Amino acid sequence: MSADLFDTPEHALFRQTVRKFVEEELRPRAREFDEMGRIDKRLYKRMGELGMLGLRYDPRWGGAGLDWTFTAVMFEEIARCDNAGVSMGITVQTDMATPSLHQYGSDELRARYLVPAINGEMVAAIAVTEPDAGSDVSAIKTRAVRDGDTWVINGSKIYITNAATADWLCLLAVTDPEAGYGGFSQIVVPTDSPGFSYQLLDKIGNWGADTGLLFFEDVRVPVANTIGDVGRGFQQQMIQFQDERLIACISTCAGSQALWEETRRYCEQRIVFKKPLSKMQVTQFKFVEMLTEITAARELTYACIRKRVKNEDATKEISMAKLFCGRMARYVADECIQLHGGFGYMKESKAGRAFVDTRLISIGGGADEVMIQYLAKMLGF
Ligand SMILES: Cc1cc2nc3c(=O)[nH]c(=O)nc-3n(C[C@H](O)[C@H](O)[C@H](O)COP(=O)(O)OP(=O)(O)OC[C@H]3O[C@@H](n4cnc5c(N)ncnc54)[C@H](O)[C@@H]3O)c2cc1C
């Protein structure tokens, strides 16, 4: 199904390149990244060399000028790296923190921050969520006050991926508290700015990503670091969220498929009451039902990709896919951990890890309820 999306020799070659990178450089170090609580920063450089960090970006800035089908190939392969946190960190770099800069940034800003993010010399993070504002982005309080040609930033952000590795942040801040949705701006903040600090957080899953609290105390950055127009940050961030959500769907479907395959292999070997677990009809039913859900989620995701390839607005479909994929992944992880029995409950089991890692999908980047709220509005309720 839908193989036509990726059936060119270029896609096959690119898939082979990414698969080799995942098999040789990510998967063997998956546990090491968990222990480090982050990805080895040098790997961004390596991914830059392989042309993986700016797939859809303009070649003028070092990008590959490709379309969403190549992004899908890349994240389908990365999802098999046995470390969801690493996949999340890479997504932040390629599709969460950089799209606005690519689309709206000045040439000077793109040369300074986008080019090194594409070649892997700099790592980026996206700083939107705050201790008192997550689902309702418009409730953020981090304030950037203008002092001549400088923004003076005060406030805090929470649950920020790449907190320790980032060289710069795509920060969403309030620049005019009286201007409603026109009172926010996206600002590039280098993390070596005086007054910036972070503190890492201890998560139940996605251990390979460094997630933290960020603090801004009179952090001064040039007004020229504003991405796009002052006051357009909220709207630009809403657009940027679409890319993040679509990648979450792609990675989720590929991760669930890999877990399904792994669990099937396990059940074919595991003897229970004198026969392989896979020979029990109830087990076979579970596998069929899971694969049906995974396939449905993937086809919905591919429908979004088709629209994005044609540059059509896919907000409705992406919101539906994000909702559906998150629920699908939780269901598949739950069934797979059960099929693994006690081993599934061990930290080393892929099912056990998926059980905690996939839980994030229905929360991060817009919770299920936020997707439903958007959809209800779009449907005219
Ligand atoms: C591991 C991890 C990594 C993250 N990485 C980043 C990052 O890199 N950058 C960043 O900016 N943020 C990041 N986040 C933050 C994430 O996007 C937020 O956690 C998410 O948007 C939810 O916001 P919140 O946690 O404040 O929950 P809240 O807004 O407090 O919502 C709590 C719950 O309320 C319910 N709810 C929300 N809205 C509605 C509604 N309209 N109707 C009914 N119920 C509703 C939902 O069930 C929701 O889960 C990350 C979070 C985690 C856990």
Image: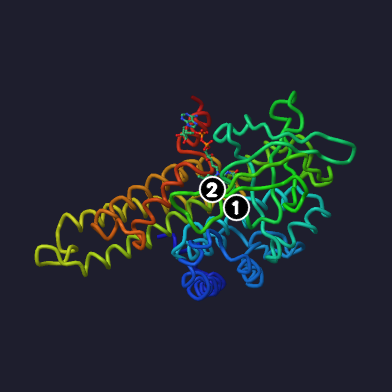
- Indicate the quadrant where residue 120 lies: bottom right
Q: Which residue is mark 2?
A: 201
Where 237 falls versus 6 (above or below)? above
Task: Compute the Cα span from label 2 to label 1.
Answer: 40 Å
Observer-nearest of 357 and 302: 357
The kind of residue on which mark 2 rests is: Leu
Observer-nearest of 73 and 22: 22
Residue 121 screen position, x and y as percent: 71, 65
Where 56 falls versus 239 (above or below)? below
Residue at point 90% right, 37% down?
148
Q: Which residue is mark 1?
A: 310
Residue at point 42% right, 50% down?
358
View extreme (left): residue? 274
Residue 10 screen position, x and y as percent: 57, 72
- Indicate the quadrant where residue 45 lies: bottom right
Residue at point 37% right, 60% down?
257
The kind of residue on which mark 1 rests is: Lys
Which element type, helix, strand or loop, lies under badge 2? loop
Which element type, helix, strand or loop, lies under badge 1? loop
